Structures are given as C-alpha cells and as structure tokens.
C-alpha cells in the first residue's frame, strides 16, 4: 500500500533539552564542529549515519533523551552551546565594526534559484547553489544583513545511480519540508503565510514560505505544494531545473515576483528592516525588478521610467554565464501569455516589459539582458569571466570598447569553515578560522612537513574508505551480488597519488579529456614506480543525452578489471561526497575549454585543504596561478578544430601528470617526506588561503556593490523620489536630442617644437554642439592610445576636458608612452546618479 499523504512528527524533548531544537534548526551547525560534537555525543553511531541534528532528535530513543535530560555534564554543554549561538547571532561583527559614517544598508535581499547550504537541505544542483550557500554563510560570519530568497523544491534536483551498462538513471525522492530544518512563516493569526502571483486565465499561484536560519541570515523558500493551488500549479516547485519552458517561466515568475512579496511579508511580520539593496544571483529571479517597479508606481505614483531609475539604483546583478547558450531565454509569446493581461504586474505596460528582455532575435526574451538593464551594478565571477562578459554583452553598450562595458568582476570564494577538514584546522592551531575574518595564515605555524604530510595521508585514507563504500553500493545498485565484489577491498591505496575530478557534466567541462588516449592513461594509472589513482564524479542534466553518454564512456573505462582499482566513477555527487574528495585528493583536476568556465570553485576547496590544482587557466585559476601553487595545463587557444584542440591539450595533461606531478609526489627524502611537494602545499595554503575565501568575496560585494548601491538608492528615493524623477527626466531629454549632439572640430597643439618624447604636454581643443544640453549634463573627453594600421585606439587613456568658452572644451595631457599614438574626442552623458559614463549606452565620437 502507498501513503496518500506524508507528514512528519517531531520529537517531544524533555524540558531540560529544549535548547537542542534551536541548535538543530539553525544551520550554523553545518560549519560549527562543537555543535556537531554535542549531537554526536548523544549517540555517535547514529549521528554518523544521519549527519543531521534535527533527524537525530527524531531518531534518538525516548529513553536516551530522558537519560540525557538528567545528565548534568550534557546539560551544561547544551547551555554553553546555546549561549555561544546567541552570542554569535547578536554580537557586532565585521559589518557592524566598519568605519562610522559609511552608508551601510540595513538589509540586502539575495535571490537565487538554488541554495546549497548542506545535504540536509537538498535544495541545490551544483556550483551555483553551493556558491549561494557559501555566500549566506560568509555573510552571517561577517554580520552582513542578508535575506536569502528562492524556491523550495519538493524533489530537489535528482539522485543519480547507474544502470548495468553505465547509463545515468535519475531518481526523484519526495522531500517533506517539515522533516527539514525549516519553519513555516506564519501570520498574526498563526496560520501559514501565503504569497501569490497571478496566472493566465484568471487563476492565481499560491506559495507558502518556509524559513531556514543560516546563522544570522534568514533564508526564505517558496513552496507551491499547497491546497489553494490547482494540481498543475502545485507542481511548479516540484523539481529544480526540470520541465519545459512553460514550467520554467512559472518558476522564475514565482522566484522573482513571489520572492519579493515573500520578503516584504517576512519583514512586516518580524520587524526585520526592509531591504535597500537587491542582489540577483544569475538572471533566473530577474522579474523581481519588475515587481519593485510595480510597487513604486503603485505607492508613489511614479511613471515607469522614473520607477526604473529607482529600481536600478538599488539592484546588483551577477552573471555566471560565459556563453550565450547558457542564458535563460523564453519565446516572446510565452512572456506575453503570462504578462499580457496585466494581472501579474498591474500598472506595467507589456511593451515596456518586453523591451527590457529584448535581444537580436525579436522572437526571444533574454533574462540576462533584463538583469543587466534592471541593475545599475553588474559583475562576472572572476576577472577573466568579467572580460568575457563585457565582450559577450558589448552590444548593449554600442560605441564603447569592451573594457568600458559596465560589468565588473568579483571573483567567487568558498566558505572555509564549511570545507576545510577540522583535522587540518586543529593542526594549524585554528588559523583556518582566521581566514574567514582577517584573511591571514602565517607560514607553517611551527608545524613540520612531517606532521602535515602525515595528516594528508590520513585524509587520503578516509577518502579511500569512502570510495570503497560508495563503489560497493554503486555495484549493488547496478545488480551485482555481494559475493562478486571482493575486489572492492583493493580499490585505491592510501599511499598512491590521488587525483580528483568532480563537477557537473556539460560538454565544455570535458569530462572525458583524460580518456583521449586510453592506453596512455592506463599506463599512468598502473605505473609500477609512480602509480596514480583518479576519482571521478558528476551529474548530467536529465535532458542532456550527450552528457550522459560522456558519463557512460567513463564508466565503461573504469569497469575494466585492469584499471578499476585505480580509477572509479562515484554516482550521486553531492556535498557529502564533495567534502571527502576536497580533503583527500592530492591533485584537483579541471580541464574546461577556455574561457568557458566562469569561475569553478571546486579547486578552491581542494586548495584550502592542501590540495594542488592541475587546471586549464580558466575562471579563478587564470588569476590565481603563480607557477608554484599547482600546474597550468597549456591551452591550444588558436586551434579552431575542437577535436584537434582536445588532442593537444590532453597530451599536455598526460605530460604534466607523468613528467612533473607524479615525480614530485614520489620524490622522498630519508624520512619518507616529499619535500618539494610539501613546499608547494605550504605555498598554496599561504597564498590561496586568503584569496579563495567567501569572506573576501562578500566583503568585496559590500564595498563595491552593496554600499554604493545603497548610497545611490538613497539619493534616488529621497524627497519623494526626487532623484529618480530627475534622472528619468534627464534621460528623456538626452534621448530626444542625442542624435543632434556633435563634435564639430578638434585640434591638437604641441608646445615644444622639437620631437615629442614621453611626458611632453600637448593641448587638445574641441568645438562641440550639445543640442541644448548644459555643459554640466555631459562629459567631454580626450582619448589617447596606441594606433596601428587600422587607426583603432589600443590601451586608451581618457582625460576629461573642461569648457573654456561657449561650445569649446580644452584639455592638457602628458603623452603616456612612446610609439605611434592617436587621439579622439568624445561626448558622454553625465548625471550624479549614473554609476559610470557608459551606463546609458550613449556616446558621440569625433
């Protein structure tokens, strides 16, 4: 018989143990070992199995709870942990201790389609979600007042297993939210709060709001599986990244518009300050900007353009997409279907909405374009990705060089306390904790190579045991008999060089690059003097048949009895598996097609544990590789044939593994320690430790995005939105006359008569026609740079010109470099509420 409905009954705790519930439901335990130790002490074997304090409270027997309620030592630990949590939640931290006088937003809303906080809350698929989870944790540690917002998926992503022939099989377990560390948001009447968004045909989509507490940060998750919805609408939040375009746009309408309404209601009910800044993590929740425009129009009586100026001022948009194919796009007629009747966003004209998502293809609505147009501050997630993004979206800012496109970069980071092995933290005297705050790790801390090498071996041993356990379970799922799996006990060796490769399986990540020459790979694995072992893991999107074929190719290779003790594929990659891999692997392999990896944070987590990266110089590795903290796989950037490129880069990978990586690992002194290897490990901990931290990332967001956005937003909304009205009026006038703005004439005058040398002063004069705009409403610039055969300016330097008389501007500049130089003059819009002169995408060139 099958149950028609499931529900969860939570444990009834004896009154002396009441403090355990707060400790179990606040997800700080996921990065706070003393809290986990407290729950483990209740029943160590049980905790090792469930790894979740909330499930622990349900699973522990009533008799054991009664016993613990009378255990004075245990109760003292409960009280100490409760006091420590309360102190953590209320004390001033980095954000509160910043210099006085800075305009610090009282709250920032952070929207993401997935959040990977811990496997106990399976609401993520991969890197984007784990990044979002690390963002919340680091914000909590720093005291940054974030509110996380996104959907709650009743089946999460999917669980992965393998068929007998190595094909990926997906399973969708049903998740009961009441069994998770979540609480329903309830209203004044103690009934669950429902937010709703209008659907076509006069229907409404309702969602209840579950709240997770990630340290100091509330995380609001919207769930449409409620009785108020029709059956098809109940399934809107069934699966992460599942369904067709119609299903997906419903999810994104809920995430953006419904998410905004959930935040507003949460703040009203709890007294939490309403957000001043809104951060969209990828374009999925971009409709939130439209909801904010609807609010301003309805409450303040502003026109659409005036509301847009106010919305943009307080919005931050992060793109994670290095290729156009990765952008969410919807057919325009589908957007019209949901927004056309005006019920979803009253007061917003359909054509204005469609214009925000316009792209080259008039039949498609582009969510990334809308995100960029609705945000005054946008960024990529590594320095290289910022450059790629500026080039990819340059058409939105015509007339500007790629370098001037207003998309910056904030390189991703990872939450050290979550990912660093506690054994390593203990060995280094707790200094890993300091990485999360002051970003410092003094070299070696008096710890010897021998001690760190022994710890690395211990972590590798733990990985070996986990690999064997998972390999056995995978084969049992594939139909093998336990009697034929004796060979699993010989899988992997704690003294063999261990390489890890684990990530999603889109084509560009090149899961099978290592299989390009199977015989050469086999020789590396089975080398008698310097063997290596490789652990591979990753999920392919259920609709990606090509990705599944790549997984099958790997599985068929590792099924070979000749190599299966040296190379494995572990199904069902998740955060639990990831911790073993990051901590136990000596080398972390990443070989995407450059520059298609936006950031790629898995190698950061390995580095924090003393692993060395072996990677294509893409994403974060492009800016962090220094020649001594790992290896850079050479790239065949000029080769356009992808098969030839793969051939060349795989050969370079084999060469590095066989000629540099393995020899260094196995080169031991009389004490059996690889001194050269350990030198690279120490250097990695020293140099990368502070740079790859999510705390560094969040501080950058505060200083370069959240704080400036709060300042601009306050200026835009003060005095009845006077700033927003002023900017909208300015844009209207600029739009009306910009075609008539002209640079009429320019002249470059040299004071000296002899040959020009670097540092000489020259004077530039320009006559302009501003078409009725005031001199204060434009910026006139001289741009000087190198020139070649095409007269295109390279390495340009800009100098602001000042009005000398009506219609004339001048500037004096020092010649910046030798060689063939050229100059031009240009006119740009200027307004106090513009973040950059390029923001409006308008420029007049001489």
Image (cartoon, grey):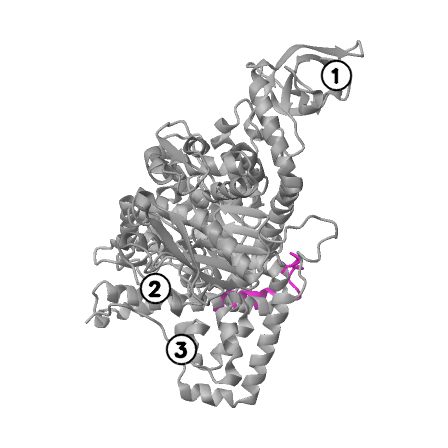
Q: Secondary structure at mark 3?
A: helix
Give the magenta range.
Answer: 435-458
Q: Quadrant of residue 284?
A: top left
Screen quadrant of the N terminus: bottom left
Residue 607 visible in the shown view: no
Q: Are marks 3 and 1 in contact (CB under 8 Å)?
A: no
Instruction: Give the spatial CA distance, label 3 vs label 2.
Output: 16 Å
Q: Nearer the viewer, mark 2 or mark 1?
A: 2
Mark before the other along the chain sequence, 2 or 1: 2
Count neighbours of disc 1 (C-alpha within 10 A) and say few if under 14, some if 14 to 19, many if 20 or more: many
Residue 810 marker:
1
Q: Quadrant of residue 273?
A: bottom right
Q: In x, y percent, where is residue 113?
A: 43, 50
Residue 770 visible in the shown view: yes
Which residue is drawn at the image coordinates 63% and 70% (left, top)?
87
Q: In x, y percent, where is residue 635?
A: 45, 37
Q: Secondary structure at mark 1?
A: strand
Instruction: Give the spatial CA distance, label 3 vs label 1.
Output: 77 Å
Which residue is drawn at the image coordinates 54% and 32% (left, top)?
305
Which residue corresponds to mark 2? 175
- Does residue 106 sit above or below 827 in this rendering? below
Which residue corresponds to mark 3? 58
Mark before the other along the chain sequence, 3 or 1: 3
Mark before the other along the chain sequence, 3 or 2: 3
Which residue is drawn at the image coordinates 41% and 86% (left, top)?
62
Q: Secondary structure at mark 2?
A: loop
């Amino acid at each position: 018989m099958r149950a028609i409905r499931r529900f969860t009954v939570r444990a009834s705790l004896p009154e002396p143990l009441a403090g355990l519930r707060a400790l179990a439901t606040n997800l700080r335990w996921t990065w706070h070992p003393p809290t986990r130790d407290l729950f483990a002490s209740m029943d160590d074997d049980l905790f090792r199995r469930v790894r979740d304090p909330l499930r622990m409270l349900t699973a522990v027997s009533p008799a054991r709870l009664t016993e613990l309620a009378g255990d004075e030592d245990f109760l003292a630990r409960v009280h100490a942990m409760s006091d420590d949590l309360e102190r953590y939640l209320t004390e001033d931290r980095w954000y509160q201790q910043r210099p006085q006088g800075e305009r610090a937003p009282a709250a920032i809303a952070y929207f993401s389609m997935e959040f990977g906080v811990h496997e106990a809350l399976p609401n993520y698929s991969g890197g984007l979600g784990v990044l979002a989870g690390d963002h919340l944790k680091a914000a909590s540690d720093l005291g940054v007042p974030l509110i996380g917002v996104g959907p709650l998926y009743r089946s999460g992503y999917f669980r992965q297993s393998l068929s007998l022939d190595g094909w990926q099989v997906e399973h969708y377990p049903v998740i009961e939210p009441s069994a998770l560390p979540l609480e329903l948001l309830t209203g004044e009447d103690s009934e669950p709060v429902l937010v709703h968004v209008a659907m076509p045909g006069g229907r409404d989509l309702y969602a209840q709001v579950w709240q997770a507490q990630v340290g100091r940060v509330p995380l609001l998750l919207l769930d449409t599986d409620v009785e108020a919805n029709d059956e098809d609408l109940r399934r809107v939040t069934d699966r992460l990244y599942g369904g067709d375009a119609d299903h997906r746009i419903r999810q994104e309408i809920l995430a953006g518009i419904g998410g905004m309404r959930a935040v507003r209601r949460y703040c009203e009910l709890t007294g939490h300050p309403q957000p001043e800044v809104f951060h969209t993590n990828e374009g999925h929740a971009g409709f939130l900007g439209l909801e904010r425009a609807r609010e301003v129009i309805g409450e303040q009586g502003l026109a659409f353009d005036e509301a847009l100026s106010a919305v943009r001022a307080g919005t931050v948009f992060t793109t994670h997409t290095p290729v156009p194919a990765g952008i969410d796009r919807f057919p325009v007629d589908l957007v019209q279907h949901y927004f056309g009747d005006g019920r979803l966003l009253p007061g917003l004209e359909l054509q204005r909405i469609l214009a925000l998502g316009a792209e080259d293809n008039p039949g498609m609505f582009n969510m990334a374009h809308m995100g960029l147009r609705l945000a005054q501050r946008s960024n990529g997630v590594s320095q290289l990705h910022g450059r790629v993004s500026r080039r990819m979206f340059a058409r939105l800012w015509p007339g500007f060089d790629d370098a001037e496109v207003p998309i910056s970069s904030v390189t991703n980071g990872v939450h050290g306390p979550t990912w660093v092995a506690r054994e390593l933290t203990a060995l280094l005297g707790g200094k890993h904790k300091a990485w999360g705050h002051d970003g410092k790790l003094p070299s070696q801390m008096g710890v010897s190579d021998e001690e760190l090498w022994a710890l690395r071996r211990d972590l590798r041993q733990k990985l070996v045991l986990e690999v064997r356990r998972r390999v056995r379970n995978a084969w049992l799922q594939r139909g093998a008999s336990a009697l034929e799996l004796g060979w699993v006990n010989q899988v992997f060796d704690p003294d063999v060089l261990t390489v890890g490769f684990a990530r999603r399986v889109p084509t560009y990540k090149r899961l099978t690059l290592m299989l390009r020459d199977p015989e050469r790979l086999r020789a590396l694995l089975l080398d008698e003097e310097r063997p290596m072992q490789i652990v591979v893991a990753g999920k392919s999107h259920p609709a990606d048949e090509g990705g599944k074929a790549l997984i099958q190719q790997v599985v068929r290779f590792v099924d070979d009895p000749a190599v299966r003790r040296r190379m494995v594929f572990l199904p069902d990659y998740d955060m639990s598996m990831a911790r073993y891999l990051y901590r136990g692997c000596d080398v972390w392999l990443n070989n995407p097609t450059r520059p298609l990896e936006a950031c790629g944070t898995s190698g950061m987590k390995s580095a924090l544990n003393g692993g060395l990266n072996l990677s294509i110089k893409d994403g974060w590795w492009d800016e962090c590789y220094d020649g001594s903290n790992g290896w850079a796989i050479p790239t065949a950037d000029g080769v356009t044939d992808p098969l030839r490129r793969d051939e060349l880069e795989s050969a370079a990978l084999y060469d590095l593994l066989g000629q540099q990586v393995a020899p260094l690992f196995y080169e031991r002194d009389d004490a059996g320690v690889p001194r050269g290897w350990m030198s690279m490990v120490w250097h990695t901990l020293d140099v990368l430790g502070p740079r790859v931290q999510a705390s560094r990332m969040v501080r950058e967001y505060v200083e370069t995005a959240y704080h400036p956005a709060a300042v601009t937003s306050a200026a835009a909304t003060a005095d009845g939105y006077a700033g927003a009205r002023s900017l909208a009026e300015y844009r209207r006038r600029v739009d009306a006359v910009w075609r008539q703005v002209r640079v009429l004439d320019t002249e470059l005058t040299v004071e000296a008569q002899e040959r020009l040398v670097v540092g000489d002063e020259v004077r530039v004069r320009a006559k302009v026609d501003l078409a009725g705009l005031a001199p204060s409403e434009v910026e006139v610039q001289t741009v000087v740079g190198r020139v070649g055969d095409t007269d295109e300016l390279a390495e340009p330097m800009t100098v602001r010109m000042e009005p000398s008389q009506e219609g004339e501007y001048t500037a004096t500049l020092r010649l910046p470099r030798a060689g063939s130089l050229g100059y031009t003059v240009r006119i740009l819009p200027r307004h106090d509420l513009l973040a950059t002169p390029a923001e409006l995408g308008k420029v007049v060139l001489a």
